[in-house]
Image (tube, grey):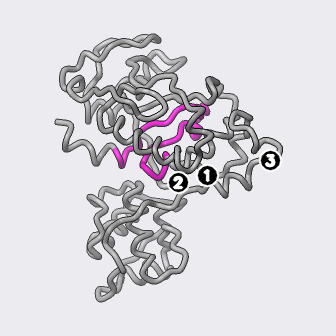
């Protein structure tokens, strides 16, 4: 009997947890390395869908529709994808962003673009929250304020690492720093003008979220970074984002990082490790 789903799963899908689990189980049965069937539609799940579709679609879109061709193929026991090595999920491309950006601003990487003109951000990615981070990594320290303070959690301190990531040095959770170095290398190839203009306003910083006295910033675990372009820091909460940041966002997304432009209070200078990516590191952070 064919397995059914109620809503779409994958890139820009409804991604109801029960439907996601169903699709993940079908992908695992096909031999695709997507991790556990956890109901979270992250980059590995979207990559698995895209890889599977490459065996029968000319233009894989990373989306499984309730009565669509991809679900029909997933239900075919004898059908196998052309490869079982997951590829990077297809997310919003720089070309798509260029189409959304007025031509008069596209020549300057620090010119501002309305967030609302960019469409859906961080497709297929999920952000983390304090409850999740504390449960998985513990509190970085016992007390926080609006100012940066040091990590005091001995377990976490073991994994704090400082290294050059290309245009600057960064201090943060070791796998996050290593991932950042790979991202920066890709930016240097695809957008050399942006790469040479990049700077950092900080990565590891144990403090509250700006304007809060209860919510801990993800900088506190060294899994987030704020970026500058030509020394200019994008203004938080004004609904506008620097053009150069819009071009970098798809690259960060493809590596499992979540862009802060999608936060309720827009924070476009901010990029942080997404939930699915962090999950892959947890076994090594014991």
Q: Which stretch appears magenta?
A: 252-277
At a point 43% along the width and 62% down the height, the residue shown is: 46
Which residue occupies the foreground of this view, 70 or 253? 253
Find disc 2 in the rendering and name its residue: 123
Examine the rendered structure and indicate whether residue 142 appears above or below residue 119.
above
Pair 3/1: label in front: 3
Which residue occupies the foreground of this view, 102 or 278? 102
At a point 45% along the width and 10% down the height, the residue shown is: 147
Residue contact at pointers 2 and 1, CB within 8 angstroms: yes
In screen coordinates, is 47 left or right of 161? right
Neighbours of disc 1 within 10 Å: few (<14), some (14-19), many (20+): few
Neighbours of disc 3 within 10 Å: few (<14), some (14-19), many (20+): few
Mark sitting earlier along the chain (3/2): 3
Quadrant that contains the C terminus? top left
Find disc 3 in the rendering and name its residue: 102
Examine the rendered structure and indicate whether residue 117 appears above or below residue 18.
above
Which residue occupies the foreground of this view, 175 or 151? 175
Label 3 sits on a secondary structure element that is loop
Find disc 1 in the rendering and name its residue: 120
The stretch drawn in magenta includes residue 270: yes
> Marks 3/2: CA distance?
23 Å
Find residue 173 and report its horizontal and vertical position in percent. 31, 31
The stretch drawn in magenta includes residue 45: no
Find residue 224 and report its horizontal and vertical position in percent. 43, 32
In screen coordinates, is 285 left or right of 205? left
Label 2 sits on a secondary structure element that is loop
Find residue 81 and report its horizontal and vertical position in percent. 35, 79
At a point 51% along the width and 26% down the height, the residue shown is: 200
> Farthest right residue?
104
> Farthest bottom residue?
78
């Amino acid at each position: 009997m064919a397995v059914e789903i109620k809503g779409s799963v994958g890139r820009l899908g409804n991604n109801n947890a029960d439907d996601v689990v169903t699709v993940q189980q079908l992908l695992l049965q096909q031999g695709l390395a997507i991790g556990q069937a956890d109901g979270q539609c992250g980059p590995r799940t979207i990559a698995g869908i895209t890889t599977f579709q490459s065996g029968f679609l000319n233009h894989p879109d990373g989306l499984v529709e309730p009565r669509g061709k991809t679900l029909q193929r997933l239900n075919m026991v004898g059908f196998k994808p052309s490869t079982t090595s997951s590829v990077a999920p297809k997310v919003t491309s720089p070309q798509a962003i260029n189409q959304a950006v007025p031509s008069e601003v596209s020549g300057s990487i620090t010119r501002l673009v309305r967030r609302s003109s960019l469409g859906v951000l961080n497709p297929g990615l999920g952000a983390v929250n304090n409850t999740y981070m504390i449960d998985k990594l513990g509190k970085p320290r016992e007390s926080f304020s609006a100012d940066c303070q040091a990590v005091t959690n001995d377990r976490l301190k073991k994994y704090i690492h400082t290294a050059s990531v290309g245009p600057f040095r960064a201090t943060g959770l070791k796998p996050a720093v290593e991932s950042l170095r790979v991202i920066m290398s890709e930016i240097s190839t695809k957008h050399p003008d942006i790469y040479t203009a990049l700077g950092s306003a900080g990565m590891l910083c144990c403090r509250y979220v700006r304007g809060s006295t209860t919510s801990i910033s993800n900088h506190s675990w060294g899994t987030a970074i704020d970026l500058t372009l030509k020394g200019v820091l994008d203004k938080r909460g004004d609904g506008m984002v620097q053009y150069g940041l819009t071009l970098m966002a798809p690259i960060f997304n493809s590596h499992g990082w979540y862009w802060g432009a999608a936060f309720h209070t827009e924070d476009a200078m901010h990029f942080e490790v997404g939930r699915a990516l962090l999950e892959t590191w947890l076994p090594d952070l014991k």
